[in-house]
Amino acid sequence: MTAPATPPDSPSSSSDPLAELRQRIDTLDDQLLKLLNERARVAELVGEVKKREGTPFFRPDRVAQVIEKVKRNNTGPLREAHVAAIWREIMSACLALESPQRVAVLGPEGTFCEQAAIEYFGGAADLIHCASFDEVFHATASGSAQYGVVGVENSNEGVVTRSLDMFLQSPTHVVGEVSLLVRHNLLRRENSLEGIEAVLAHPQALAQCQAWLAKHLPGAERRAVSSNAEGARLAASNPAWAGLASERAAAQYGLHIVAHAIQDDAYNRTRFAVITLPATLAMPPASGHDCTSLVVSVPNRPGAVHDLLVPLKKHNVSMTRFESRPARTGQWEYYFYIDLDGHPSQAHVAAALAELRALCAFYKVIGAYPVKT
């Protein structure tokens, strides 16, 4: 008998559906690559115009606008968060053709600070690894880095006091922020909890994992080092040591993840500030979801701190953070770090700041920048 003819609109029995789909993907990849290179060539022309005009190469507000636009135009099945991540990397790669951005971060490789910088600037940024947040501030202020990323606050352990102190001395200002979900993993050369004599990490990481460490490694020394990635690097040199760091650090230093996500708070987050000189990038324009950060001091008289709050209430400006730090004058004086909801270009914020400034012995706007909602 003659076999029935295969319908013309269906694949033959000998065809390979997976191979056909892969061929379609290969074709689409070729088309995407051509379009990306065409976009890159236009970005190079943009860079030439910016160079002639002397305008900033990196514009975080422009990056945010482009990403929001593609998210609105997304019809799926890609998720908005994934579309945003893809476009951030595309824009980062194109910006590297215009002018590679030098970004100072806490080192060595594998820190959460490095991760925050990549999330903000994309993977094409030229990262400069520093031994401390002090060095990040100095590198940015001196111009050896165009931008810096420093930790400012953790959801469990509070503010990073050294960063607050540096804002007083540094000519840099804040132009952006990154809020990072931080998961601390126990890293070690041996894939076992047995024989761990010391756990090395940044003091805040040790504090954020103290309950787990007390239960599972009560006899191990807790040794503070300059960063979690430094703890991982050191742990790679001694089989009796372990570090608390990211999966990125584990891959970087060839360590086993002995225990995943051991932080005491499952929603542990750290907020990082993006800093730069005003000459590199001026205060970003209002986005509609902004934070204004300032540091002030007031004369040492009764009711002086209370008086700071009056202009905010009068002009309906919300205060989202209030921290005090000793002025180190020996006179029991304090600096107050304040975050306000809004932007100085808004009339009610400007009016509140003007009245507040008149009450202060010291007044400095650290920055005004968009925040994620």
Image (cartoon, rainbow, N blue to C red):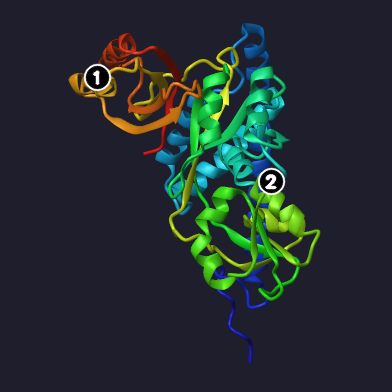
* Residue topped by disc 1: 307
- Precedes in sequence: disc 2 or disc 1: 2
Secondary element at tag 1 = helix
Picture residue at 66% right of the left edge, 24% below the top? 138
In the rendered image, which quarter is residue 197 located in?
bottom right
In the image, farthest residue toward the bottom = 1
Q: Amino acid at mark 1?
A: Asp
Residue 140 position, x and y percent, is: 65, 23
**On screen, residue 197 above or below 281:** below
Rate crowding at label 1 as few (under 14), some (14 to 19) or many (20 or more) other CA atoms within 10 Å. some
Report how far apart the C-alphas of labels 2 and 1 lie in the structure.
64 Å
Q: In terms of depth relative to the viewer, which is nearer, 215 or 111? A: 215
- Residue 252 in view in this figure: no
In the image, farthest residue toward the right = 237
* Residue topped by disc 2: 30
Q: Quadrant of the N terminus?
A: bottom right
Secondary element at tag 2 = helix
Residue 137: assigned label: none
**On screen, residue 246 above or below 4:** above
Rate crowding at label 2 as few (under 14), some (14 to 19) or many (20 or more) other CA atoms within 10 Å. few
In the rendered image, which quarter is residue 65 located in?
top left
Indicate left or right for 295 with 88 as reference.
Answer: left
Residue 3 position, x and y percent, is: 62, 86
Q: Amino acid at mark 2?
A: Asp
Residue 52 position, x and y percent, is: 66, 7
In the image, farthest residue toward the front = 330
